Amino acid sequence: MTRYVRNMRGYGQNPPRAAWPNDAKIAVQFVLNYEEGGENCVLHGDAASEAFLSDIPGAAQWPGQRHWNMESIYEYGARAGFWRLHRLFTDADIPVTIYGVATALARSPEQVAAMKSAGWEIASHGLKWVEHKDMAADEERAAIAEAIRLHTEVVGERPRGWYTGRCSENTVQLVAEEGGFDYISDTYDDDLPYWLELEERDQLIIPYTLEANDMRFATAPGWVTGQDFYTYLKDAFDTLYAEGTDGAPKMLSIGLHCRLVGRPGKLAALKQFVDYIQSFEGVWTPRRVDIAEHWQTHHPHQRIERPSMMDKARFVESYGGIFEHSPWVAEQAHDLELGPAHDCAAGVHNVLCRAFRRAPKEARLKVLQAHPDLAGKLAAAGRLTAESTSEQAGAGLDMLTDDERARFTQLNTDYVAKHGFPFIIAVRDHDKPSIMAAFERRIGNDSTTEFAEACRQVERIAEFRLQDLLP
């Protein structure tokens, strides 16, 4: 059984209505990453200096050496940038979420006190601001535990949110496994929170951002001036605000760093954006933990039976009748690469159709021949499948006049004699007159053309049947 673990579907075309407090049209959430004092540095026991997210063009790690310039740039974030941002957000009465590296927090007691006094959320940003991609799972698990321990000791309470950033493929699983986090943000894959099923735990995910983020002052392509940043944030806000006005409220995450946007030439643009959004009605500016509490209350998770997780017997039991009297279609579909994207009507329909289309013509012909005549003897005798009975009744084919029944009978006889299979049409797309018109038109097709059309109609019928069962 081949299964694809990545989720390419998400909420699909019908995301939930967020129902933000006070019927807000958008949630704008500011994150301030506090990494200063937790970055790579030989003073911290690391093998080399930091090289990531600074104003030094083309910075590289210096193995075994302190990088005085790099260290001083990080120190600017703690010494000056943080306080400039603290004044901006407290003056605007906007609470932020701190992504706090535990070792950085431990080296910044005044800043931690100011965060707490302002009522800001202090989420965990890991033990150290270093790469985790090459860490063994046990090593990373231990680092997570130590981050929580140190964070709790320094802040006075354990973190409720988590974001590693420079994460590994195991990070989300390991953090969820710890069991104490209201949310994890090590994803960038949606405009709304969502639930992730990880074994027995239902873990709330609040996606973060790397694009509405001042880190692009230090990466290429990126922001050159503060106005670049402001324009991008404004455009993102305007788009999402309009969606919320149309009844689909979303969330805008904005990522900030003390040593980057804390510089005066960059901060002016951030202040301009804060002033801009505060001129609108219906803007909610929560902490991430506030979003988590809202989502847990208004959108609690409910597990469903997922087609991609079914064993073959259950899959065939559930979908073996979608193609009329042809369970082999479901049997072969189950062997394809299924994943979360197939846990919906469109997904199951896709794999069933793939199995049907790849089958030899003789097998597809048997599927066509398994379909009943429209308004034929089986219908009169009440021997149709439940699905076919409902479909034919929905088009009024169970309420024919004697003349109509006679005409259908003659057309059925002539059609089967010519093509070797019954006339098939997705009756839910039609009414009784249009079905009769299609019957009389299509009976004149050559058999190759009609075989192809009948196969398309079988797939359309399957689509309707699946829509009755799945979202």
Image (spheres, helix red, strand yellow):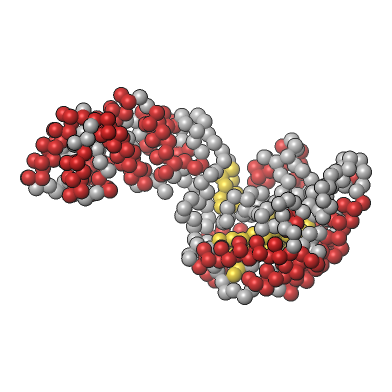
What residue is shown at x 46% (from left), y 55% (from top)? 14
Q: Is residue 321 left or right of residue 417?
A: right
Q: Is residue 287 visible?
A: no
Above or below residue 309? Residue 96 is below
Residue 121 in picture, x, y percent from top left: 71, 62
Q: Nearer the viewer, residue 47 or 72?
A: 72
Residue furthest to the left in view is 402
Find residue 375 and report its image quarter: top left
Above or below residue 287? Residue 44 is above
Q: Is residue 365 visible?
A: yes
Q: Is residue 179 left or right of residue 302?
A: right
Above or below residue 91? Residue 28 is above
What residue is shown at x 32% (from left), y 42% (from top)? 460
Q: Is residue 218 left or right of residue 326?
A: right
Q: How many marks?
A: 0
Q: Is residue 128 left or right of residue 318?
A: right
Residue 143 in picture, x, y percent from top left: 77, 44
Q: Nearer the viewer, residue 261 or 385?
A: 261
Residue 51 in picture, x, y percent from top left: 82, 47
Q: Nearer the viewer, residue 317 or 346?
A: 346
What residue is shown at x 67% (from left), y 73% (from top)? 275
Residue 348 in picture, x, y percent from top left: 42, 39
What residue is shown at x 78% (from left), y 52% (from top)? 53
